[in-house]
């Protein structure tokens, strides 16, 4: 992901200059630096954050390092775009929220890139237009071709479904208050998948999410927002239709990169634009915290709690 | 519905002759008899069932009369196609099952017409082909334009969702064992809708059904069957695409008649063919019983039971 | 085709009784008679037409016999549904028109079944609604999986494109006045295909037709009617969508039978209904004549005439 | 268009710096310079081309100035991206080709942006994959919502259809050799539209193009490439599907900007990348010349020549 982000910044985002790079594997870091033709390689992530030529930091390191690196950025007073998840637990996310609140204004953007997906944005715009009335339900599907053997049902919630948790909060502009996880019959040789999650929002709406990380046929992300007077759905995003072999076919991508290429580009552009003008864009540390809290309720439901409540503290004023 | 069925039999089903008609409103009965140009009007439904010129009976009377008329047909040894629901409760359905079991062979066909819908049949055929692997989930959506004010959440389960209960049992070839009903935020002026139902099957599969009887925009019935290696979905059934007013549009029907016209025709043809050869087709009294038992579990869940178990007795050999 | 029609009449059309059958192969005739369980086999087609138990005749014999059998039906004063083409040339069609005109009222229906296809009928209804304004163009595509080696470009016009000629005349309610045929590069091993036909109507509209009888991938018939304020298209008619192997696919049928099953059924029902009430339905002998005249202009264009004019005599009053 | 291009370069293309701007209206030039926050306004286009801080020039001025400005860029040895058309006639285009040939290597890129449209590129990639066999036909449709009253049939060919001429040459990798233009019945109040163009390629393939600049319903560009074993089509590009008011709808854009936003962005990125490395991208001056020659044949056909041949001189080696 780090290399992807570096390439996007270098090739798609005017105004961004890659001043320094760090990767645990210095050979890989050097290769990327060479490829994009800019930026030196630093000896540690903290060195990079401290680097005087670095105005803002993009964190795409292993999940376990997200919190500490983000806290270091806040300590340095530097804007940071942190890949999701913001931290390994809601308690850790709360540390980031507390640090940023103490700092007094937003520095943190969490990489929930779907907020920048043109189709998701169009869905939200159609809701906001008022033509369809109030939102009542949001049906979501999130399928991958295959997952590693160690990717279990818990990770399906903490690593995959969090995208839908954030999307639902963003589209519906409300918090998610209760989560119930169902485990359908598993696919052969894929014991961790699928899971089906039913969620209640603070407005009483119902959100449901199918996560199926071994869906085999393609990378497929869908949502339908059901409102009082109509519905709006993400459309399957194929560009060409092929007639061959008895079928009219639309191609699925093999993973999220082609599907969300626009979202990653627009997220990076929005981040750089916001950083340049001292502002902030996209998902906040609070959003990262809330998604983590919902995921934790999901884990409690998965391990026997039935319908698990999500409890959130008061939101800091800097996130309003 | 009675008039619809009479017209279908008269205009679409060779081999069917309408020998007699009954309607609580004799004027209406006479009008239909005149329209289709065949069949006399009898003074009571029991008189019709007893009529020596009547070989088989189609019951499309008010729901509260289904059980008694079906029992009368069994008592007369005459095949009967009874509109769904078979009876007002699973206990009443059990009476029909018991009477038919005592008779010793199938006489009863329940009007779960989706089994004859070419798209539903194609979905099942694709599962049976084996190409997609085992079925894991079935997502269903069932939307009507609007429902009367007295059509509450309970009726959404007992009268609407029963179609999906039967479809799931038929596609997946298993029983439904537990039901949990969720009530999302209701549409303004439509306090009874929508409901969202999550069901477990005896094979461990997950079925979910959105019932939204005040969906406003059109009559829309969808299903996606999720299997290990792929999925199959009912396609939105518009025949022409219209480009006008800034949009490419597909028309929804206003109700179920256009959507399931083929299913009603094929159901009637299959019934007449089965009756002619002494056989039976489509959903059995047992299927009607099972759908009612699932609906009753749904009602218990709706009124506070959480996840409600469905318990079924041993199935009579005549239904194997 | 004869067996198909016999099965449709027997299984889908109340009011039709197959009183007699003829096939050049008496074994095949007997097999069909046995299968549908009705009707004797006659020794010749003329014997069948003369049979006192035969009220109306369906001609699905080899093309070369259509004209003489249809003339025999007219001579006998019996209604006849003749498969397209009505005759081998426009001159022969004119003989049928003359005979029927002399008889004084319609007896002949030509099997241009697309007029009964629900999608084609919906296209016409949308034009007639007036919402789209006047029709300006009609784009048509007509593809088969493969054609026999002897099926040359001329036959693509006389046997395939005639369906579009009739459709265009019926949708646009006008005559076709000039035809120009283009021969694109041929597919390897399919020297006769494809052809592309551009047609002018008496109203100045443009119709174009791609005929590609070796299109390999499936049976695919499409039309888009372009009007002043919008367009209406036949939709690809798949019933289910399958996600598998990296693709979302809709199945094409292998030939016209599944695509036009509804059209054949509705055509047969309309014919029997019309015959029963002494009326007539569908394409007339005049329509058969006009389609043949357009095809002949197409052949002249194909063999060097450039843009070939279609000239038609005065239409008999029985066709107004 | 000039302002659009400036915004794209400034907001989407790393490596591009807008050093100077010129617009015949200095107020507008100043407004754009202020908006994008970079670049001074020069007093004339020639002054801009001569400006020592200008490495490469984007020409989006009125069509009548394209040739002279492009020639001035070549004289200055500076790369130029010239909006289509390259010049007002094929003879003028030939001057550019001659000047560039004399220069000895490519400096000119013509703004046929569809070559950078991801859907068009996918269509070409599917042809090149070989899976579909050889290309036989290309069907194109190009519709705008409305055109000014002075936009006549000739302009439909020279200004609209040239996009399809270039697309066909690029996809099929061959020259277009003959053109025939048809004028269907015109829409009321839109006397210049539509036109229908049938084209032959040097490989014997058939290309046809409907141009309808008063199509009313939306901006709609389509193509289907028909090959020996299958076809590939551009898919209607809506991102969300809306169910409302009895319909499932996909939105059309009002003009080409949303439809080809990706193409303009990718074209600008490819141009800057090519310029940076001394190379060249996209459509050449020769391509601009060839499109103009085809358009002129189209005009001759429109004014009575029937099928008009396209004659092209020998292509300079710098375009191989």
Image (cartoon, coloured by chain):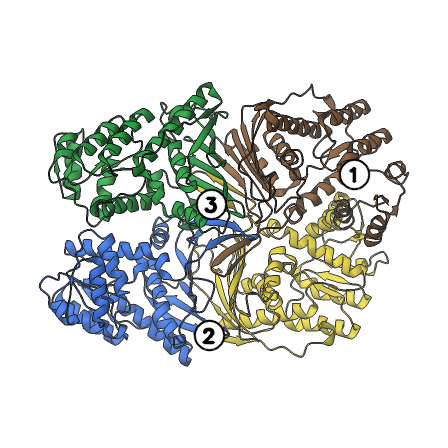
Chain colours: A blue, B yellow, C brown, D green
Residue occupied by mark 2: A190
Q: Is the same chain shared between marks 2 and 3? A: no
Residue A287 in which image quadrant: bottom left
Residue occupied by mark 3: D233
Residue C59's label in the rendered image is 1
Would you say residue C200 is visible in this rendering? yes
Would you say residue D156 is visible in this rendering? no
Percent x, y for residue A222?
Answer: 42, 59
Q: Residues under labels 1 and 3: Cα distance? A: 40 Å
Q: Is residue C208 left or right of residue B40?
A: left
Q: Residues under labels 2 and 3: Cα distance? A: 36 Å
Mark 1 touching mark 3, by CB under 8 A? Answer: no
Tell me: residue B120, above or below residue B29. below
- Judged from this view, the residue extending furthest toward the bottom is A304
Q: Quadrant of the N terminus of chain D?
A: top left
Tell me: residue A207, above or below residue D228. below
Q: Is residue D91 left or right of residue A26?
A: right
Camera-nearest label, 2 or 3: 3
Mark 3 residue crowding within 10 angstroms, few (<14) / some (14–19) / many (20+): many
Mark 2 touching mark 3, by CB under 8 A? Answer: no
Q: Is residue A35 left or right of residue C186?
A: left
Mark 1 residue crowding within 10 angstroms, few (<14) / some (14–19) / many (20+): many
- The one of D109 and A232 positioned closer to us in this rendering: D109
């Amino acid at each position: 992901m780090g290399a992807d982000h570096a390439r996007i910044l270098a090739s798609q985002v005017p105004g961004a200059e890659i001043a320094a790079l760090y990767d645990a594997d210095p050979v890989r870091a050097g290769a990327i630096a060479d490829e994009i033709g800019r930026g030196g390689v630093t000896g540690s992530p903290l060195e990079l954050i401290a680097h005087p030529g670095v105005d803002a930091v993009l964190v795409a390191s292993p999940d376990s390092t997200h919190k500490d690196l983000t806290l270091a950025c806040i300590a340095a007073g530097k804007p940071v775009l942190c890949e999701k998840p913001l931290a390994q637990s809601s308690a850790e996310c709360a540390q980031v929220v507390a640090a940023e609140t103490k700092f007094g204004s937003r520095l943190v953007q969490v990489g929930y890139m779907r907020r920048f997906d043109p189709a998701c944005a169009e869905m939200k715009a159609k809701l906001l237009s008022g033509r369809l009335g109030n939102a009542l339900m949001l049906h979501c599907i999130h399928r991958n071709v295959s997952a590693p053997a160690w990717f279990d049902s818990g990770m399906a919630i903490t690593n995959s479904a969090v995208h839908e948790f954030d999307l639902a909060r963003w589209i519906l502009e409300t918090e998610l208050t209760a989560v119930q996880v169902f485990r359908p019959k598993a696919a052969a040789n894929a014991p961790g998948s699928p899971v089906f999650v039913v969620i209640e929002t603070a407005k009483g709406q119902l959100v449901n999410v199918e996560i199926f990380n071994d869906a085999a046929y393609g990378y497929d992300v869908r949502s339908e927002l059901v409102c009082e007077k109509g519905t709006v759905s993400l459309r399957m995003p194929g560009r060409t239709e092929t007639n061959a072999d008895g079928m009219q076919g639309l191609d699925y991508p093999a993973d999220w990169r082609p599907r969300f290429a626009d979202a990653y580009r627009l997220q990076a552009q929005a981040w750089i634009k916001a950083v340049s003008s001292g502002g902030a864009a996209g998902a906040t540390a609070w959003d990262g915290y809330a998604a983590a809290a919902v995921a934790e309720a999901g884990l409690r439901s998965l391990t026997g709690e039935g319908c698990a409540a999500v409890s959130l503290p008061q939101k800091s004023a800097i996130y309003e």
